[in-house]
Image: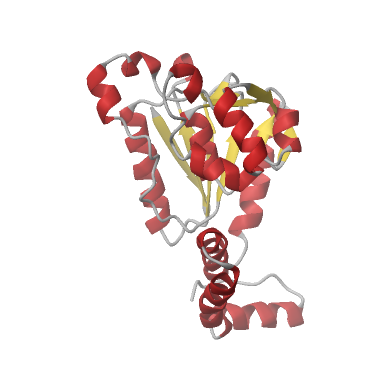
C-alpha cells in the first residue's frame, strides 16, 4: 500500500491505494513512518517527496470503513508521526483530494505543490471527531489562525487556488506537470549543503514555540558549528572558483 522509489539522493513515497482514494489504514501509516525513518537515517538521501497514486486523490484521510470498528476508533493514531524527528526536507506533491488525515500528512511536508484539481479540507467536525493528525497544531502555523479556524471548525473544502492564496500550498500546476514540478523542487533541496539544510529546518520549526530572544539564541546555537564545518569551507571555495560545491555532510 506504500510504494517507495529511490532515484539518486531523492526518495519518493507514494500512497498506493487509488481504489480507496489512498485512504489511510493503520498499515499504511506504519509504512509511511517506516519509510520516513529510513529516509531520516540514510545519509545518502537528501530530499523526500510524498504523493498519492492516481489522479483523484493525494489522500482522502483515514479509512472510514475501518473507523466504523469501535476498537479501531479507540486505538487509531490521531497524532500523525508526532514522535518523528526528520530534519531533512520533504516535498508534498498534492494530486487531487487532500482531506482530513491526508491534510495532516501534507502539513508534515515542508513545502507543497498542488495540482489544479486538488481540494483541501479538515473533515473532523463533520464526522464528530477532532481534526487530528496534526491539523489543529500545524495548520495555524502554516496559514495563520483565522484561516485555520475556518477550515478546522467548518469542515468546508477549498480548491487549489484558494489553498495557494492562503499559503497552504506554495505552487499550483496542471496535474500532468505535478511529478516533474515536485522533482525539480526536490532536486534543488537535495543540492544544498545537508548539514545546513538540517540545521535550518530544525531552527525554523523549533523556534516556533520559543520567545523571540530564546529563538534567536537557538538559531545561533545551531548555526555556530556550521561555520567551522568542511561544507562551509567548500561552499566558500566553490563560490570563489565559480563551480558547483561538492558537499560531504561534515
Name which quarter of the figure residue 139 lies in: top right
Any part of residue 157 in sight: yes
Above or below, 48 against 203 in this view is: above
Tell me: residue 17, above or below residue 242. Answer: above
**Who's the residue at 72% across and 38% down the image?**
166
- Describe residue 77's horizontal placement relative to residue 217 as left or right: left
As drawn, 175 above or below 7: above
Q: What residue is shown at x 50% (from left), y 44% (from top)?
A: 137
Please state which of residues 103 and 207 is positioned toward the viewer in this rendering.
207
Numbered-mark total? 0
Query: Is 196 positioned to the left or the right of 44 in the image?
Result: right
| Front one among 241 and 151 | 151
Outermost residue on the left side: it is 71
Find residue 192 and report its horizontal and vertical position in percent. Answer: 62, 64
Looking at the image, which is closer to me, 31 or 110?
Answer: 110
Which of the two residues, 48 or 141, is positioned nearer the viewer here? 141
What is the basis of the colouring in this image?
A: secondary structure
Indicate whether 202 appears above or below 93.
Answer: below
Task: Give coordinates of residue 102: x percent, y percent.
Answer: 50, 30
Q: Where is residue 16 in the image (x, y as percent from the top left)?
A: 45, 26
Q: What residue is shown at x 40% (from left), y 32% (from top)? A: 2
Q: Can residue 168 be seen in this view?
A: no
Residue under the point 37% across and 35% down: 78
Question: Which percent across, then down, holds residue 34?
Answer: 34, 44
Query: The N terminus is located in which quarter?
Result: top left
Amino acid at each position: 500500500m506504500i510504494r517507495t522509489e529511490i532515484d539518486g539522493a531523492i526518495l519518493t513515497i507514494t500512497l498506493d491505494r487509488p481504489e480507496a482514494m489512498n485512504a489511510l489504514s493503520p498499515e499504511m501509516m506504519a509504512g509511511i513512518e517506516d519509510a520516513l525513518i529510513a529516509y531520516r537515517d540514510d545519509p545518502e538521501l537528501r530530499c523526500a517527496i510524498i504523493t498519492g497514486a492516481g489522479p483523484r486523490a493525494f489522500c482522502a484521510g483515514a479509512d472510514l470503513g475501518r473507523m466504523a470498528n469501535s476498537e479501531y476508533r479507540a486505538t487509531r493514531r490521531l497524532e500523525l508521526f508526532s514522535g518523528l524527528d526528520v530534519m531533512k526536507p520533504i516535498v508534498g506533491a498534492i494530486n487531487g483530494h487532500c482531506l482530513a488525515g491526508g491534510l495532516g500528512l501534507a502539513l508534515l511536508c515542508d513545502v507543497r505543490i498542488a495540482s489544479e484539481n486538488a481540494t483541501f479540507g479538515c473533515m473532523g467536525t463533520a464526522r464528530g471527531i477532532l481534526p487530528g493528525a496534526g491539523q489543529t497544531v500545524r495548520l495555524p502555523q502554516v496559514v495563520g489562525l483565522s484561516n485555520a479556524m475556518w477550515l478546522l471548525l467548518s469542515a468546508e473544502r477549498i480548491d487549489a487556488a484558494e489553498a495557494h492564496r492562503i499559503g497552504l500550498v506554495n505552487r499550483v500546476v496542471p496535474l500532468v506537470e505535478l511529478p516533474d514540478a515536485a522533482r525539480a523542487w526536490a532536486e534543488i533541496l537535495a543540492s544544498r549543503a545537508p548539514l545546513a539544510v538540517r540545521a535550518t529546518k530544525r531552527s525554523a520549526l523549533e523556534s516556533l514555540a520559543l520567545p523571540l530572544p530564546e529563538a534567536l539564541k537557538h538559531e545561533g546555537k545551531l548555526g555556530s558549528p556550521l561555520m567551522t564545518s568542511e561544507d562551509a569551507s567548500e561552499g566558500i571555495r566553490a563560490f570563489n572558483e565559480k563551480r558547483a560545491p561538492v558537499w560531504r555532510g561534515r
